[in-house]
Image: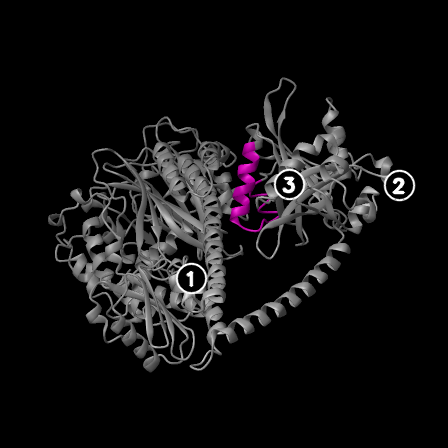
Amino acid sequence: MASSSRDTQNQLTGSSSKNTNSSKKAMAIAQYNADAQLLHAFEQSGESTKSFDYTTSMKSAKESVSDEQITAYLSRMQRGGRIQPHGCLLAVEERTFKIIAYSENAVEMLDMAPQSVPSTEEPQSQSQILTIGTDVRTLFTSASAYSLEKAAAAQKLSLMNPICVHCKNSAKPFYALVHRIDVGMVIDFEPLRTGDAFMSAAGAVYSEKLAMRVISCLQSLPRGDIGLLCDTVVQNVRELTGYDRAMMYKFHEDEHGEIIAEIKRPDLEPYLGLHYPATDIPQAARFLFMQNKVRMNCDYRATPVNVTQSQELTQPLCLVGSTLRASHECHSQFMVNMGSIASFVMSVIINGNDAAGGGSGRNSMKLWGLVVCHHTSPRAVPFPHRYACEYLMQAFGLQLSMELQLAAQLKEKRIFRIQTLLCEMLLRDGPIGIVTQSPSIMDLVKCDGAALYYRGMCWMLGMTPTEAQIVDIADWLLEYHGDSTDINTDSLTDAGYPGATYLGDAFCGMAAARINSKDFVFWFRFQTAKELKWGDTENHSSDKDDGRMHPSSSFKAFLEVVQRRSLPWEDVEIDAIHSLQLILRGSFQDIDDSGTEAMTHSQLKDSRLQGLDKLRFVATEMMRVIETATAPIFAVDSDGLVTGWNAKVAELTGLPVGEAMGKSLVQDLVFKESVETVKKMLYRALRGEEEKNVEMVLRTFGPQKQKKAVILVANACSSRNYTENIVAVCFVGQDVTSQKVAMDKFAQIQGDYKSIVQNPNPLIPPIFASDKSVCCSEWNASMEKVTGWTRDEVIGKMLVGEIFGGCCPLKNQGAVTEFTVLLHSAINGHEIEKFPFAFFDRKGNYVEALLTANKRTDADGQIIGSFCFLQMSASNYNRD
């Protein structure tokens, strides 16, 4: 974290999300300023850069820089005009294929000079000269030129990569990696090494299979252990890529970084546990990692190659999406100083809302961290393995999002439980109970000490300032921040508290909640430096810190930045403090010097009674909604006896509400084949483990007896009483009887499956199939109806990217990754049942379904692809 980024953050702030978002935005803007200042200092140090002292420069990074310097800084990062020398680059006009820019090594690398290797194509002509204005298609074989034209016509260029091209003169093979920019297309050319097998666009399946082994390993890990998940990822990445060191680098909320997992060659210096200032990975670089999610540097000691461009271009060529873009000299110098000659970096991107425990949403992706690999000698990873790593990171990001969401939910539940207990103590023991009983206010959030300042007296817990100092802080808040009710800072010094110098290095962070006109609850934190240590202190002696750019100097710079500063208060902690403040203010507001606690108890009891009346009203409304719902809904008590049975489930089964009440769900209402499933589902739900999309088969009665059975896919919801004990389970179902019956008939047919797949009978559910390359091989009439896309339009296209993700957009990249994992799991022989799957049809309608996928075999039992069908809700299936 740069010094300049703290100025906004470390003012006393309130707990509203608006203030938090504003603070984060200001922090990011200030960080750009600091990054530009450091880069300017580096460039002013001369070619040798020996005069550049990283630690000293960090201290002066809070000085403001001009808008021109910021613009120049961003331009050098994104439009630096240089590439790595292991490949070459051409930029072309998309319509004419005329070259508008080329790297200076392209002529030699693409064998423009006559070679002794014979070619089946015509001899080199004047039109094959590589210069501005040359038609790029004339430089390669006719088949290669056609491949480039086909790629340029694609809506999503990324789906076409890599393109195999051969030089016209020598037939030398290259991977061509294409992406669009503002002025045309950029083509990165990477030579195929001897022994490399070519990877076609459909051959991406090979890379996905490489990643699937690791993904299966990640999915088998126990939930709730993010550390184990990260350790497993870096271990497998190192095995997949062969680098000397692999690390997980996490970005904290205040923008600084930390190595939280590492696996390395035994003789290398460990970096595990190191913290780095935010300027080590500038904001502009983080933006690049969001755009180009896998980044390889083959040799930091190699001289970069300049890019020559047309004089008609008004600004340097944008290299953001180029796989060959050269690093800035500052970063290269840092890597060489630490003995790393090559690196491979993968972005870890999560849903930004999931990290805070919120819901998902579009355009909320967040760079959570990086998986970083270092090597002590030059190293290049072939494209198939890089693609496999990118796919692995997408799957890891999804799993990490779920783990972070689970951790946030558990933290919120813990906070809620403590708040509830504090309320009970308040009722029983009065205000002093929240500091004299257990749990106390100190248990609410992570802190080193807490205090209650009430009616001129102090009750202190843990490590806190002295009573006199707490009184002084309270007086300062009342005098200078009288309009603020809840405030927090990670630096009392930066917040302007005049007595901060007397607190020394001990108490830097403070959160305060004002509970009435003069009384406060306080939480205190030590400075960050006391919380941190090197991964191996014996290997990090001070003589290594000579001011050069190196992990040791970065760590020292970080300690300089966090001196007299605590860890920042997290959003969930601020919200917890604010919630407790509202509870306490409501309890204390009517207590005056002559009042008694009995008045408070009476008012709280009245408030409780009013709350119960509101709950009764809500419960009545809820019952009305359930009774009239179009979905089958029923409930059972803790003994499994029916206590609720709505009109829809009565209609489906033929069992009236009156007769259903009191019957045993397991013994009286489900078929034998579902007994164990329902027992297990009920057992878990009564313990708070709510299962989703579980199939159960209900018996039929009376007028519905001819149907033999009703097949539901149900979700279980645990129902709690006012003491938070689970007393019942509610089941919300979806009727899939007709679709299930049709699929059972299909499964029994051993002959030509096409007679079923292509049957226009409306009872046949939507069905599609893939070959082993995940290209669409079947698409029945029901799929045409549901998606709006005909069979002829999709057969042969890739199910992932071209059909789902192209013709039928999915919600986000995470959904694309989940679908890819599912298809490969099915092809590998794993049956996938009732996976929630949603997409947008041809008209833009959002379609939700449950997806079941199985392997598809030939007459000899060999796997030839996957077979999938959708279970649709009636509203989606019957849509015109």
For badge 1, the amino acid type reads Asp
Mark 1 and mark 2 residues within 8 Å of each other at the beta carbon = no
Mark 3 and mark 2 residues within 8 Å of each other at the beta carbon = no
**Residue tagged 1:** 571
For badge 3, the amino acid type reads Leu
Please tell me whether residue 817 belongs to the stretch shown in magenta: yes
**Residue tagged 3:** 682
At mark 3, the secondary structure is: helix
Q: CA distance from mark 1 to mark 2?
A: 57 Å
Name the N-terminal-most of marks 1 and 2. Answer: 1
**Residue tagged 2:** 703
Quarter of the view holding residue 233: top left
Callout 1: few (<14), some (14-19), or many (20+) C-alpha neighbours within 10 Å?
Answer: some
Name the N-terminal-most of marks 1 and 3. Answer: 1
Quarter of the view holding residue 237: top left
Taking depth in this image into account, of 861 and 794 the one nearest to the observer is: 861
Q: Whole-percent x and y of residue 844?
A: 66, 54
